[in-house]
Image (cartoon, rainbow, N blue to C red):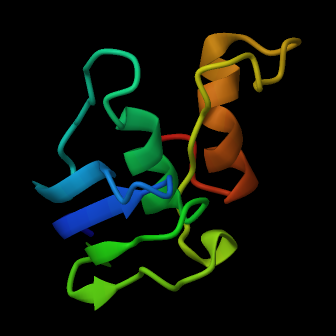
Amino acid sequence: MSLVLKNVSKTFDDTNQATLKNVDLEIKQGEFFTLLGPSGCGKTTLLRMIAGFNSVDGGEICFDDKVINNLEAHKRDIGMVFQNYAIFPHLTVAENVAYGLKAKKYPKDQ
């Protein structure tokens, strides 16, 4: 499945100044992708929009050709690990990363 963002925008305050403005992006199935930028540039906001935790004010977020803007977060079948320590402190890094895959009962070889 690919992830496609088309002109995605997000505004948070009364000034209508966009936090994110017209973001276009395509991540194809199997690609490894990272977001890198200074604090406050919108990385977390974009990830929260993809995950369904923040609403989309403009544009479309799609899995393949299906628009998911209004799809509930728990129905998106994706995960997000926050930058703070909201992980399981008793597990290793590998065990934390693998947790979601185990919960979905993925075979070990995957």
How many badges with numbers are in the image?
0
| Residue 81 appears in the picture as rendered | yes
Residue situated furthest front in the rendering: 15
Q: How far across and how far down the image is residue 58, in percent?
A: 29, 75
Q: In which quarter of the image is the N terminus?
A: bottom left
Residue lying at the far right in this picture: please name it.
90
Q: Residue at x 80, y 15 (%)?
A: 91
Tell whether 38 sits left or right of 95: left
Given residues 32 and 105, the one toward you in this image is 32
Residue 78 x %, y %: 52, 59
From the viewer's perspective, is residue 105 above or below residue 59?
A: above
Give residue 102's position: percent from left, percent from top: 70, 46
* Residue 22, picture quadrant: bottom left
Q: Which of 37 and 4 is in front in this view?
A: 37
Q: Is residue 98 left or right of residue 49?
A: right
Q: Which residue is drawn at 49% across and 54% down?
A: 12
Q: Is residue 7 left or right of residue 83?
A: left
Whether residue 61 is visible, yes or no, is no
Residue nearer the viewer, 19 or 45: 19
Please identify the quarter of the rendering in which residue 57 is found: bottom left
Residue at x 39% of width, y 17% of height: 39
Q: Which residue is drawn at 60% across and 18% down?
A: 94
Quadrant showing the C terminus = top left
| In the depicted structure, whether residue 92 falls above or below residue 28 | above
